[in-house]
Amino acid sequence: MNKKHFWESKTKLGAVLVGVSALLGTIGGWLTGAIDLTSAIQAIIMEAGAVMSVFGLRDLPVVNK
């Protein structure tokens, strides 16, 4: 099995794009006052968890150096 960078995998690249777009939406909602800080923090944690579930913890560059 070859070790690929995340941008060479369509699934992982898609997960990053979805995570970034959800993160930007959450930050934008918090900055405009549409959602409160507590809801924004919960959403950011859930979005990070979704991206980590696609990558798998072993494949994250932060965890596996």
Image (cartoon, helix red, strand yellow):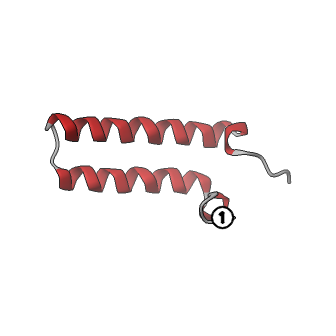
User: Residue 30's x, y, as percent?
Assistant: 21, 41
Residue at 17% across, 43% down: 35
Quadrant in the rendering for residue 62: bottom right
Relative height, residue 20 to residue 36 (above, below): above
Quadrant in the rendering for residue 61: bottom right
Residue at 60% across, 53% down: 55
Left or right: where does residue 18 sit relative to residue 30? Answer: right
Query: The N terminus appears in which quarter of the rendering?
Result: bottom right
Q: Does dot 1 land on a helix, a strand or a loop?
A: helix
Residue at 36% across, 36% down: 24
**How many other residues sit within 10 Å of disc 1, few (<14), some (14-19) or many (≥20)?**
few
User: Residue 28's x, y, as percent?
Assistant: 27, 35
Quadrant in the rendering for residue 38: bottom left
Numbered-mark total = 1
Left or right: where does residue 14 sit relative to residue 50? Answer: right
Residue at 54% across, 42% down: 15
The residue that label 1 is drawn on is: 58
Query: The C terminus appears in which quarter of the rendering?
Result: bottom right
The three-letter amino acid code for the residue at tag 1 is Arg
User: Residue 45's x, y, as percent?
Assistant: 36, 57
